Image: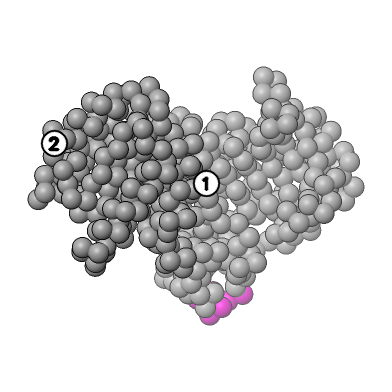
Amino acid sequence: MAKLLEHHGKDLLRRAGIATPAGRVVHDLQEARAAAAELGYPVMVKAQIYAGKRGKAGGIQSAECEAELLQVAADMFSRSIQGHKPGALLLEQRLQIEQELYVGVAADPAARAPAIMVCESGGMDIEEVVASRPDALHKWPVDILRGIQLYDALNLLRSLSQITSKQKLDVARILCQMYEVYRRYDCKLLEINPLALTPTGAVALDARVDIDGDALSRQAGLGIEIAEDAGDRSSTLLERIAGTIDAGDHRGTVHFVQIDPDLSFCQEQHYVPIGFDCVGAGVSLTLMDELVPLGYYPVNFCDSSGNPVASKLYRITKVIFSQPGIQGYVFESCVSSQQLDNTARGIIKALKELYPGTGGQPSIPTVLAFRGAWDGDAIRLLGEHGISAGKWVRVLGRDATERDVAHAFHTLHGEWQASVGGMS
């Protein structure tokens, strides 16, 4: 899934005819001063980050004059908001608001269809409102073959008592336009919270747009960098690089996400950070369960499965080893029909480029466990290329369990640490 920043989401809304406040994206104080002068005071200053609840964290503020604007913008640029440091701010005209609504379109698993949604209590605390009063959220499932008509949206809004008939018509049109955006751009979620009812009409004050990651090839015009879903943070450089590995080549897949990109969790919990790759998510979880109690924490998740070609393993192995501060690498395959000799070829080529001085023998503890189709050929190739002869390498076969792999790495890491003193 690819999350869009607010100003990118609003671009899509405007293409569909949905009104948004006049605004400018700025990247420094000089741009902020010029943009605010053009928009006219007062202005809203909004941090552009991927996390929600910015308002409660001080990421949305009003500025009445230039001095206040510069103070607010400097503060936002200099600090972390919900764990993210903004690279840009969105400055918008402040509007006169009569009422705020929540409107959205999302996949409804129970109905197996998209659903349009509306709540008369929009704003920062919408989750709390819906949790305490589930009946406050009104939903209408949409038949994707039929689409949504204006009267469908009006039927959904019929039970709303706090807005006028004219306002209901405005909101109904916006719901239809939102559904058009949702379908056209392969969204998984599209929210406007709040949708402001103003004297001149309904205006989208915010926009949350999540694009289906499996559909990004159809949305090349949006300029989204492909990466695995990283939650509420922006994707890292390595995640974006890994996201290109499957582009144009569907022979197997590689899924990579950094769990602890800056190693802050490992440092806080006193874990040893390691790189990690498994064939199959089930093996990944089982092996993690064995490694973590021994004091090791995989700082990335990687699943290279579906019988990927050697070139994909070559590229993802280089990505995993590029993570700063890792003190080891573990690879394990599940017992499957994946052609493990090709997997080994990719890993061997990557290691030879990463460690040219030793012919590909890593300088950090490395355990490779090949179990499944062509596992014997994979192990033979590692021997022929001298990888398995490395002092800090252990190669295991199909008889090894996840516990065996974890304990082999634990023993090897202990020897490595005693010999070289760990990472400098």
Farthest residue toward the bottom?
67
- Write the residue at 37% across / 58% down: 273
Mark with earlier residue (1, 2): 1
Task: Sort mark 2 into few (<14), some (14-19) or many (20+) by Cα contacts within 10 Å.
Answer: some
Q: Is residue 233 something one can see in this rendering?
A: yes
Give me the C-alpha separation between circle 1 and circle 2: 43 Å
Quarter holding the C terminus is bottom left
Q: Which amino acid type corresponds to the residue marked 2 in the rendered image?
A: His
State the extent of the magenta-drawn residues as a range.
64-70
- Write the residue at 48% across / 42% down: 286
Query: Closer to the camera: disc 1 or disc 2?
Result: 2
Foreground of the two, 351 or 333: 333
Dot 1 corresponds to which residue? 3
Task: Sort mark 1 into few (<14), some (14-19) or many (20+) by Cα contacts within 10 Å.
Answer: many
- Left/right placement of residue 252 relative to residue 100 reads left
Farthest residue toward the top?
145
Is residue 68 within the magenta segment? yes
Dot 2 corresponds to which residue? 385
- Left/right placement of residue 348 relative to residue 30 reads left
Q: Is residue 85 something one can see in this rendering?
A: no
Height in image: 91 above or below 259? below
- Left/right placement of residue 191 relative to residue 334 reads right
- Write the residue at 19% across / 35% down: 382
The picture places residue 180, in percent across and down from the top left corner, at 62, 32
Height in image: 230 above or below 93? above
The secondary element bearing badge 1 is classed as strand
The picture places residue 84, in percent across and down from the top left corner, at 49, 63
Q: Which amino acid type corresponds to the residue marked 1 in the rendered image?
A: Lys
